[in-house]
Image (cartoon, grey):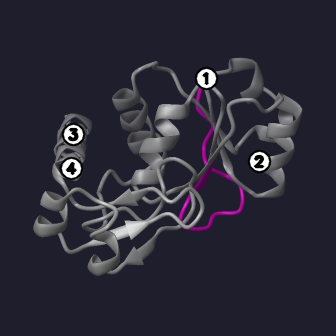
Amino acid sequence: MSHTRSFARREPLTFFADAMLGKLARWLRTLGYDTAYQSDILDADLVQQVLHENRWLLTRDGYLVQRKVLQGRSTLIRSDDVREQLGQLHVELGLSLLLNQSTPSRCAACNALLESLPPEKATALVPPVVAKQYQDFVRCPHCHRLYWPGTHWLHLQQQLTALRARAIR
C-alpha cells in the first residue's frame, strides 16, 4: 500500500523514516537525501513533525499510513531488507540510486550536511595509510564523523549499481 506523491512537489525529496527503518535512513542520507529519523518518537509526534517539515513518511506501520493527514504523503515499506526497500522507493517514487559525488553530502549517522576538511587537518584524524592514499575528506559538524572515498564508498556504489540493474528488469 503505497500512496502516490501528491503533496506540494518540490525537489529534492525529504523524508522521515519511522523507528523500524534506521538502516534505510542511513542509506538515504548516504545518497544525499535529507532524512529525519528518531527511534524513540511517538506516532503523534512523528505525524506532527512530518506535517510541520513537509516530509514524506516512510514506514512499516500499516496503521500509520492509514491516517487521513498522511494520505498522499507516505509510503508503506513492504520489505525488511534494506536493498528491497531502496528498490521499492526507486520504482514508486523515482528515487535516484546514484551517489552524486566522490564523498557523501550528508552524515549517515545524524543527517547533518557535511563540510569539506582539508587533507592537512584530516591527517591527524585518520590512519597514516588513509592520509597518504586520499585527498578528499568531509566531516560532520555535529557528530564529527569523518568520511573519505575509500573502499567502503566503492562497495556502496557496487551495491547501488546492482540495485539499479534489478529495478530495470
Circle 1 packing at 10 Å, graded few (<14), some (14-19), many (20+), is: some
Q: Earlier in the sequence, mark 1 or mark 2?
A: 2
Q: What label sits on residue 50 in the rendered view?
A: 2
Q: Spatial distance from mark 2 to mark 3, Cα to Cα?
A: 29 Å
Is disc 1 in contact with disc 2, using a CB cutoff of under 8 Å?
Answer: no
Residue 117 is situated, as x and y percent measured from the top left of the image, at 38, 76
> Which one is in front in this view, the residue at disc 4 or the one at disc 2?
4
Q: What label sits on residue 157 in the rendered view?
A: 4
Q: Earlier in the sequence, mark 2 or mark 3?
A: 2
Residue 37 is situated, as x and y percent measured from the top left of the image, at 64, 42
Residue receiving disc 3: 159
Is disc 4 in contact with disc 3, using a CB cutoff of under 8 Å?
Answer: yes
Q: Spatial distance from mark 4 to mark 1, Cα to Cα?
A: 26 Å
Q: Amino acid at mark 2?
A: Val
Q: Amino acid at mark 1?
A: Arg
> Which one is in front in this view, the residue at disc 1 or the one at disc 3?
3
Kindly state the secondary structure of the residue where label 2 is placed. helix
Residue 6 is situated, as x and y percent measured from the top left of the image, at 67, 52
Q: Earlier in the sequence, mark 4 or mark 1?
A: 1
Give the position of the N terminus as an image quadrant.
Answer: top right
Q: Amino acid at mark 3?
A: Gln
* Residue range highlighted in magenta: 1-15
Residue receiving disc 1: 60
Q: Is residue 12 magenta?
A: yes
Q: Is residue 40 magenta?
A: no
Does residue 52 lie above or below 162 as drawn? Answer: below
